[in-house]
Image: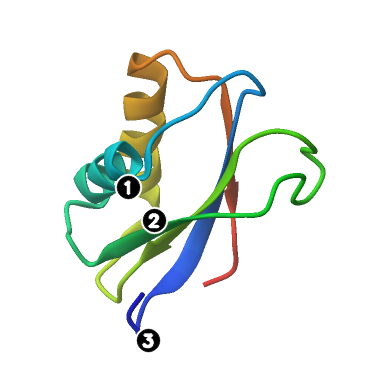
Amino acid sequence: MANHQTQVFILHLGSQQSIGPGDLRVMWATACESLDIAVARRPPGHGNHTGRPCFGLWAGREFHRAPAERRMRALLEARGFLFTLTHTAL
């Protein structure tokens, strides 16, 4: 991840669901309308969602939170994911 990127969301999937890093990266880049993004799997049991797959979603300086969040939620829902998308501080 580049130094100018900031973690903006934590994504928890349903306990019986998974996504590959490449697929998640494509979805997140599409939602952000930018390639200046990164995704990273977080350790199991992070936060209050013990046992659920957890990922950090990172974005660059030109990130626009509200439209990117709407698009990401729509993409996840369209693929049938059960998820929690939590804001982190900018």
Q: CA distance from mark 3 to mark 2?
A: 19 Å
Badge 3 marks a residue whose secondary structure is loop
- Under mark 2, the amino acid is Arg
Q: Residues within 10 Å of mark 1 (few under 14, many from 20)?
A: some
Q: CA distance from mark 1 to mark 3?
A: 21 Å
Q: Is residue 17 above or below residue 69?
A: above
The part of the image, by quadrant, that contains residue 70 is top left
* x and y, in percent, of residue 61 in the image: 30, 76
* x and y, in percent, of residue 44 in the image: 71, 46
Q: Residues within 10 Å of mark 3 (few under 14, many from 20)?
A: few
Q: Is residue 70 above or below residue 41?
A: above
Q: Residues within 10 Å of mark 2 (few under 14, many from 20)?
A: some
Q: Is residue 39 above or below residue 1?
A: above
- Using residue 7 as the reference point, say whether residue 38 is left or right of it: left
* x and y, in percent, of residue 30 in the image: 20, 43
Specify which label sits upstream in the sequence, 1 or 3.
Answer: 3
Which residue is painted at 22% across and 67% down in the image?
36
Q: How many marks?
A: 3
Marks 2 and 1: in contact by CB < 8 Å?
yes
Badge 1 marks a residue whose secondary structure is helix
- Using residue 24 as the reference point, say whether residue 89 is left or right of it: right
Q: What residue would you read off at disc 2?
A: 65
Marks 2 and 3: in contact by CB < 8 Å?
no
Q: What residue would you read off at disc 1?
A: 68
Which numbered circle lies on residue 3? 3
